[in-house]
Amino acid sequence: MEIFFQLETYIALFTLTIIEIILGIDNIIFISIITNKVNKEDRQKARVIGLLLALVLRIIMLFGLTWFIGLTKPIFLDFSIKDLILFFGGVFLIFKSALEISHKINVNFDEKIIIEKSVSFGSVIWQIVAVDFVFSVDSILTAIGLTEILLLMIVAVVISILFMIFYSSKISDIIDRYPSLEILALCFLILIGFTLILEAAHYEIPKGFIYFALFFTLGVELLNIRFRRVSLKRIKIKK
């Protein structure tokens, strides 16, 4: 119990929580997009149920640390179960994001309504849990590397999931209001999918470059939104 009276314990908890939140950014973007496919009154419910199920899955994985570490052991050549999870997760993200972009570009308004209504509540929950499982691989390995205290890992995971529950709704509302941001987010998920495949092939790409690219393009798009808004005001004034 003396660990709870040590400053190092709280520094480790703070560091681990921040890392878990940063690694969860990709997950937040995916959840925000996929939950926009269900009716508005069901979106928050889908986010909460999906993320709570993902939380239970992560805690089970943390309790099975010995099993989880075994996922990193090679089973064929230099490839492990972790590599296979990352590979298929990357393929799924690329396929899903490309399909969503295709729908946005190629269907008309009436077809879009039919497509969005055809997405079931259960399939959205399943996709949230599946994608969170893929993204949780790195976060749990990071947790294991930072601390050996299981309780700290669980607390950090719980905080990060609560953070995702709160902010996924905010991001979802923004994406719903500005469709161009959804295209940007989907392109970013394609990029993440490629990085997961490269990581499965043991080619490491610093996450800092990826997040810099995200925030830079996001800044450019926000300037474009601001520019379009000002241009519309000027046109209205001239009329």
Image (tube, rainbow, N blue to C red):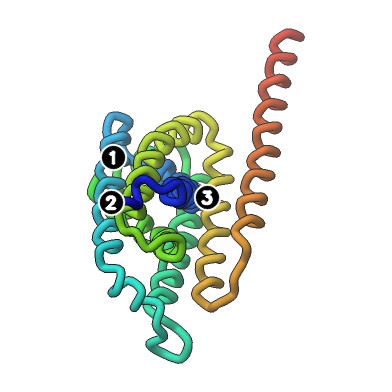
Answer above or below: position of 211 versus 61: above
Question: Residue 12 at x, y = what percent?
Answer: 45, 52
The answer, for residue 174, to whether it is visible in the render is yes
Q: Quadrant of residue 166?
A: top left
Cα gap from disc 2 to disc 3, whole angstroms? 46 Å
Q: Residue drawn at (41%, 50%), measured in percent from left and top?
A: 9
Cα gap from disc 3 to disc 1, whole angstroms? 22 Å
Residue labelled with disc 1 = 48
Identify the element where label 3 is drawn. Answer: helix
- Tell me the amino acid under the disc marked 3: Leu
Image side of residue 129 versus residue 96, left or right:
left
The answer, for residue 24, to whether it is visible in the render is no
Q: Residue drawn at (25%, 43%), measured in percent from left and top?
A: 49
Query: Between disc 3 and disc 1, whose residue precedes?
Result: 1
Query: Between disc 1 and disc 2, whose residue precedes?
Result: 2
Identify the element where label 1 is drawn. Answer: helix
Identify the element where label 2 is drawn. Answer: loop
Disc 3 crowd rating (10 Å Cα; few below 14, some 14-19, many 20+) is many
- Tell me the amino acid under the disc marked 1: Val
Q: Nearer the viewer, residue 104 or 71?
A: 71
Instruction: Identify the mark at residue 1; answer none if there is no mark.
Output: 2
- The quarter in which the C terminus is drawn is top right
Residue labelled with disc 3 = 186
- Tell me the amino acid under the disc marked 2: Met
Question: Residue 99 at x, y = what percent?
Answer: 46, 56
Question: Residue 154 at x, y = what percent?
Answer: 31, 52
Q: Quadrant of residue 208?
A: bottom right
Instruction: Identify the mark at residue 117; answer none if there is no mark.
Output: none
Q: Residue drawn at (53%, 36%), measured in percent from left and top?
A: 179
